[in-house]
Amino acid sequence: MTVRQTQGAIESLFNDVPVRNPVSQVMTADATPGHEEVASSTTISNEIPGPSGNNTSSCAISPMKFSPMKDTIKEDSLKRFGTKFTPISQLNQYLSDWTIRVRVTHKTEIRNWSNSNGEGKVFSFDVIDKSGEIKITAFNSQVDTFFSLVEPNEVYLISKASLKLANKQFATINNDYEITLCGNSCVLACRGRDVPSTRYRFVPISELEDKDPDVIIDVIAVCQEAGDLAQITTKAGKQLTKRELRLIDSSGKMVTLALWGEQAQTFNAPCHPVVAIKGARLSTFGGRSLTAFHSSILMVNPEIPEAFALRSWYNQEAHAYNFHSLSEFRSKAGEFTTNWKTLSDVETQQLGHGEKADYFNCVATVVFARKKNCLYQSCPTTSCHKKVHQQPNGRFHCDKCGKDYSGFKYRFILCVNLADFGDNTWATCFQDTAENLLGLTAEELGGLRDTDEDAFNQVFRKVYFSTHVFRNRIKLEIFNDECRVKVTVLEVLPLDHRQHSKNLLDRIRTLAQKN
Amino acid sequence: MSTILDVPKSRINLSMLGAYIGKPVCFVGRVEKVHPTGKMFTVVDGERQSVCVELNDPVEEELSGIVEVIGIVSNKGALMATTFSMLRDEKGIPFDLELYNEALKVIHDFPQHYPFVVSSSV
């Protein structure tokens, strides 16, 4: 049975004016298949008119001060709208005049835009009923009408909206269609305890490997570690903030989840929280990894059974697991779980003494750079960096290539001493890091060394007592019976004092909480 | 009053003002308004609270941006300034007052790690 109301009835409901005249409502019985009979346990079920033909009832809406913008519709008024609603899963473009009864699971903020076609604003909300979920969008003047009316977790009757094929590129909801509200759309708050709330379909991390890339999925897992907030510049030159979380679950596998923008900035959950994400995209970036959308729903320690189960699994069993990661970890400074150390930690924690090399980041100041022998003569072939030896005939011989060359190219092997408040250490910068630190190429420095001693010295003077973030590799090496830890600088990054301070404050607070 | 500069001064924000009445303190905040006489100005801290700073001599230069005031807290809750220095917005990295406030809270929350002592330099 479809419900049809006269235009006047709708308008009177939206105006904050008591209705004085009785309004007739026409209810027609259509034998349209596939409409859901609302269960009789709901509050609006009692007056289901029988399927026997037309049922005309003229009922007066009592002249109460009626403001549906703010109040929930009274039960008896709802009963008059009839009880057949269309399940979301059965919405299609060929249905005219459908009404859905749904709960709002997610609502975005208003977004304004301005481009060559003009300006506009938009907001959207996701809704759910027993049969499925769908996204509803409102533009421009509909934003004004509906934004304050729609609240997350509340149930509404929605009708007279337009249905169209979903734009899958930005879709986090699995539905071929999406809804757009228009000028005469009707959104009425109602009761609906039987309407489900956010439904998650969690996928164990181990199953992510078998899924196709770009699918939208829900995952619930324990956040073993949360990376620092990082600034990323996209190829287009846009600045984004990103935070990577390391998620583990009882399937024994681990995956990274990338949060962006505000989600990344506001994420602050120490002590291994349970994290549930709905509507994340599985990507093949770095193996298999997850990335959140602006519209993905992130919940920390949600009060759902799956979260409690994960919590007790983590507390009891997780320590024994060796988690195999589906995502590659690129431990770049500021990106994922930067291993911050101070130079005094190098000694006290015996970094590099293990079987494998240790990687760490530190904030340090360059206090010395060895000018002598900072450059060596290297084979001019593109990929060969072997040192060449000058022959009596003036040519240069490369042992690796086994050939003589007329020239060579300069390459860096720069030895620096780095210091912080606690300790100092020698470290070696090779070509890329040295060029980055000194601010000129090996060829240029080589040229200066041969021609302009003052300028050559100036290059080094500039770098003395400059403070940077150093990403290093440290390993114990045996060299002629002597055991020494060798530190190699893998990357030199500018020090953002504010970000570093925030990082330190976070770490202090986390440590304090642990105690 | 050069003696105040030799004495240890606590760094505070305005929520701690009450505990430091009569004591020498170091306060950092953003200049809000300067009184026409130039002998008083209001400063806002990282928690958006404001305090009056009173000077002995009227201020000679244009006061704006972040200032660090060294002085004694009067029993009316104002700062009797002995000296102050300006951290101009145009020079260097902009000063993040909220971040400074967070650091201040850490110093006061963990006095065992940030002891307020005078260490004699040899």
Image: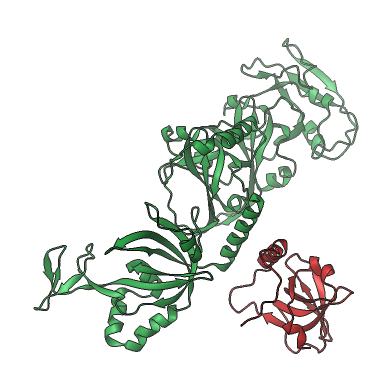
Chain colours: A green, B red
Compared to A378, does A201 lie above or below?
Answer: above
Residue A333, position as x, y percentages in the image: 47, 59
Compared to A263, does B74 lie above or below?
Answer: below
Total marks shown come to: 0
Determine which quarter of the picture holds residue A17.
top right
Q: Return the residue found at the far top.
A: A52
Q: Return the residue found at the far front.
A: A481
Compared to A487, does A161 lie above or below?
Answer: above
In the image, taking residue A213 as reference, residue A172 lies left or right, namely right
Q: Return the residue found at the far left.
A: A393
In the image, taking residue A342 as reference, residue A98 lies left or right, namely right
Q: Nearer the viewer, residue B69 or A354?
A: A354
Q: Nearer the viewer, residue A369 or A181?
A: A369
Residue A228, position as x, y percentages in the image: 54, 55
The image quadrant where one finds the C terminus of chain B is bottom right
Residue drawn at (74%, 73%), measured in percent from left and top?
Answer: B10
Residue B24 seen by the camera: yes
Residue A268, position as x, y percentages in the image: 63, 50
Determine which quarter of the picture holds residue A186.
top right
Residue B65 seen by the camera: no
Q: Nearer the viewer, residue B116 or A406?
A: B116
Residue A81, position as x, y percentages in the image: 77, 24
In the image, taking residue A388 as reference, residue A179 lies left or right, namely right
Determine which quarter of the picture holds residue A40.
top right
The image quadrant where one finds the N terminus of chain B is bottom right
